[in-house]
Amino acid sequence: MVHSYRQPGTVLTDHRFTVPLDHARPDGETIELYAREVVASGKDPATLPWLLYLEGGPGFGARRFIGRQAWLERALADYRVLLLDQRGTGRSTPVNRQTLPQRGTPERQAEYLAHFRADSIVRDAEAIRPALTGGAPWTVLGQSFGGFCTTHYLSTAPEGLTAALITGGLPSLTATADEVYEAAYPRVERKNLAHYARYPMDVERARRIAAHLAERPAELPGGHLLTVEAFQSLGLLLGAGDGSHQLHYLLEDAFVPTSGGPALSDAFLENVHDRLSFAGHPLYALLHEAIYAQDPAAPTAWAADRVRAGHPRFDAAKTLAGDEPLLFTGETIHPWHFTTDPSLAPLRETAELLAARTGWGPLYDPERLAANEVPVAAAVYHDDMYVDTAHSLDTARAVRGLRTWVTDEFEHDGVRAGGTRVLDRLLALVRDEA
């Protein structure tokens, strides 16, 4: 049954679809997908073309907008929008520590999760498109990992696309996970130094918190263990437009006086828990390195952790033994995540199997992209902490007809922070190309 309901300025309709777990075995096991259609109030949806939105991640369901927030305001002027919860996220057969054990052994769980990368997500989109559009192609907007999916879409099913819009998500077509992280650590270091230049008082604050945790790791609400390494992972904030300011406010009141001396405050620990917990998006941790895997013979093998060893300035113990600023880390997943976070701990063996897995297939087809005929526009954010700008521009040059808007006006979350303007710029670029 299809349900429609209203929010300010919009009409929403719930859609559910059944698709194969493995599209290579269409008669095998199936999973359910959920998507929310959004149409501007007063518009006839039958007269509007479709725009499919693919969220960043991996592991995040489509954003739950209220009314015409962010880029929806611009999109709804021209489109009926489909907000797809990618498989394993949101309401689309969610994957987490509660549901995965139903698959059986860690080996079976890992095999199941091998079907949750960009290739399966795009085949899901192609499976549901005929039922919604009557077979007509649609425009796709991909944010971050959603842009990775969109690039795969262009590689494998361009006939399904009227246009492709990518924000902060042009992937390298060839880089290995190791190469992705070798490029990432210097960018993250620059973001750290920029943060400390803006907030020099945070140098001592961060060192003090890290020294405290080195002696006494703290227990967060729900049993999450806050170690020095987990504290450093708050650097994920530094890739967002207001992230440096958020980190500053988080650090400024970390301690409270107690009868036993200074202690980390309950408020600080609660706020840190909200930033660090993977309970709402465990696929992000489980599959993060797998989104870069394309060599059938090569496992990712905890690439971020291995590469970090070659960047000693991120070693907290060495930092605390000297007088350097503590460096926060960025978008990296490590084995210790699966011991410190209760939402991930039951999946530790599954994560190890995925890290050791071989047989990953290629995600992009350079030859097909070089012959691309779909209008494509991409927002590339200058010195994006999450996606290497040089990698993105190399890909932009490799995709025929792709037009870029390179800007330092926004960080990686530009489609959220300046969504209307970002989307308007990309739509103008693809319409010029068309």
Image: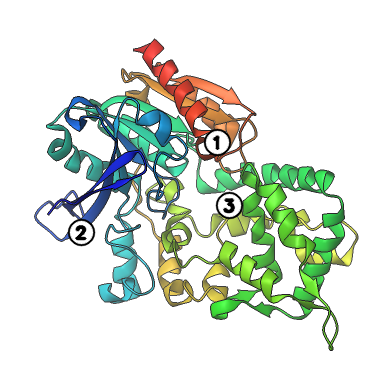
Q: Nearer the viewer, residue 207 or 21?
A: 207
Earlier in the chain: of badge 1 and badge 2, it is 2
Q: Which residue is mark 2?
A: 31
Q: CA gap, disc 1 to disc 2?
A: 32 Å
Q: Is residue 153 above or below residue 294?
A: above
Q: Report the residue at 42% width, 73% height from top.
A: 347
Q: Is residue 213 above or below residue 239?
A: below
Q: Which residue is mark 3?
A: 331
On residue 414, the disc is 1
Q: Of helix, strand and loop, which one carries label 3? A: loop
Quarter holding residue 113:
bottom left
Q: Nearer the viewer, residue 52 or 144?
A: 52
Residue 39 image offset from top left, x and y in percent: 28, 36
Mark 3 or 1: in front is 1
Earlier in the chain: of badge 3 and badge 2, it is 2
Q: Report the residue at 61% width, 26% height from top.
A: 407
